[in-house]
Image (cartoon, rainbow, N blue to C red):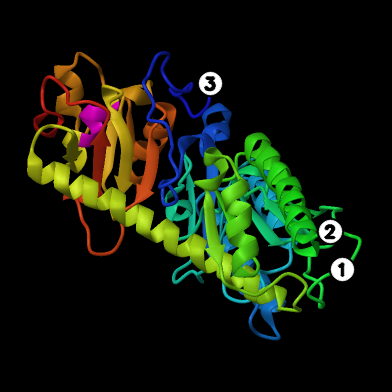
Amino acid sequence: MGPEGLSGPRPGTPKREPNQTDGGIMHSERFQTLLTSQGPYGSIYFDDSHDTADAATATELKWRGLHDELERQGAGTDLLRRLELAITAQPPTVGRGSRVLVANAEGVLVDQHLSAGAGTLHARVSELPYIVPALDADAERPGHLVVVVDHSGADLEFHQGQAGGGSVFTTTVEGGSFPVHKAGRADTPGYGDPQQHTEESRTKNIRTVADRVTAIVDDEKPEVVFVVGEVRSRNDLVAALPVRAAKLTVHLQVGARNSGFDPKVLHDAVDGWLIQHHRDSTEAVAQDFSAEIHRGEGFATQGLPGVCAALRAGAVDTLLVGEMGSATVVSSDDLDTVAPNPDVLSELGVAPTRILRADEALPMVAISTGADLVRMPDGYSATDGVGALLRYAPRQPAAIT
C-alpha cells in the first residue's frame, strides 16, 4: 500500500493507449512509485538557475529558506536530510531553470527539472505528495533519438528522457561502402559506371543506418526521431525506414554531418521542438475538454463534485489540473472514496475520516486509477480549477453527482 488508501490501478480498469501526440500529457506511470510510498511528504519547487556568478550561494540561501519553512510545517530530520542531499548533490542548472522535488523519510520520489525559472518558491509538508508543479510547462522530457546522417553513416544520440533517468547514449554507424561521392571525371575506363557504384554504396550505407535506427526504435521506444543532415541524406534515410519508425521522424535543418556546426545549435533545436510539441499537445487536450463540455454528451466533467464522482467510478481518462487554491475534499480511510463534502460520502454510506487538499488528493486518485494528468494551459479554465476527460459517459452524469 502507498499513501493510505491507495494501492494502484484497479484491476481491469481500461486505459487509453498513449500516442505520438501525447507530448503534453504526463502519464501516470511516471508517478507509480508514489503509490507504494508512505508519508508524510515534503514537496518543494524552487528556482534552480545558474546564470549568475553567485548561483551556488543563491541556491544555498534558497535551501535555508525552504528548510526553515518545511521545519515550521513539521518536517522530520530524515525528510529534511533527504531533500538537502538531493539539492547539494547536483550542481545548479546551467542557465535558467527550476526544480521540483518530492521526498519522504526514505528517499527522493520525484526529481523534476524544468527549463523555466520558478516564479514563487513552494514548500509543503503534507499527508499526500504535491505533484502539481511537476505537470507544468516542459516538465516531461520524452525519450528521443537524434540521427545526424550522411551517405557514409550516422552519429546517433539516444536520450532516455526523464522517465528513464535522463541518460544519454551515443554511437556512430559507419556504412563501410565506398565510394559515396561522384568522381570528378566523366568516366573511369575498366571499372564500369562510377555513378552506379556511388549510388549503390550510398544505398547500402543508408540501409545500414536505417537498420540501426529501427533497432533502437523497437528496443527503446523513443517518442520522436530527429533527423539531421543535408536534404538528400535525410530524405533517403526516412525512405529506407519502416513505417513504424518513419512516422516518428522530424527533420531539423541544422547542418550537414561533419560540417562543423555547433552542437549547442542542434540541442537548442531539439529542445525547442520538444517544448513547443509539449505545449501544442497540452492545448489540444484542453481544446478537447472544452469541446466535450460544450457538447454535453457526458464525456467530460468539471468542478469538484463532477470530478470526484468520475474518479470514484474509475472513469477519468485525463485529469486537467488548474488553480484549485486551498480547496479541500473529504474521504474515508480509502482515498478512492474522495468526495467534495461529507454529505456526498454520507449518501454513499461512507463515513468521512479525512480532510485533504484537493490539489494533492485528486492527482493521487487519478494516478491510482491509471489516468493521465495535464496542467490546464493559459486561456482555459474549469469550474473549481479542475476538469476531466472521461473514458466513458457514466449512466448518471458525473457533473450532477
What residue do we see at 54% from left, 42% from top?
41
Say if 260 sits above or below 140 in the image. Answer: below
Query: Residue 330: horizontal and vertical position, in percent?
Result: 28, 32
Label 3 element class:
loop
Query: Tag 3 or tag 2, which sits nearer the N-term?
Result: 3
Check if mark 2's residue and mark 1's residue have beta carbons within 8 Å.
yes
Left or right relative to 21: residue 380 = left
Among numbered discs 1 and 3, the one appearing first in the sequence:
3
Secondary structure mostly seen in the magenta stretch: helix
- Distance between the alpha carbons at the discs numbered 1 and 3: 75 Å
Where is mark 3, residue-wise? 1
Magenta residues? 307-311
Mark 1 element type: loop
Rate crowding at label 1 as few (under 14), some (14 to 19) or many (20 or more) other CA atoms within 10 Å: few
Q: Which mark is residue 192?
A: 2
Horizontal side of residue 195 vs 96, given as left or right:
right
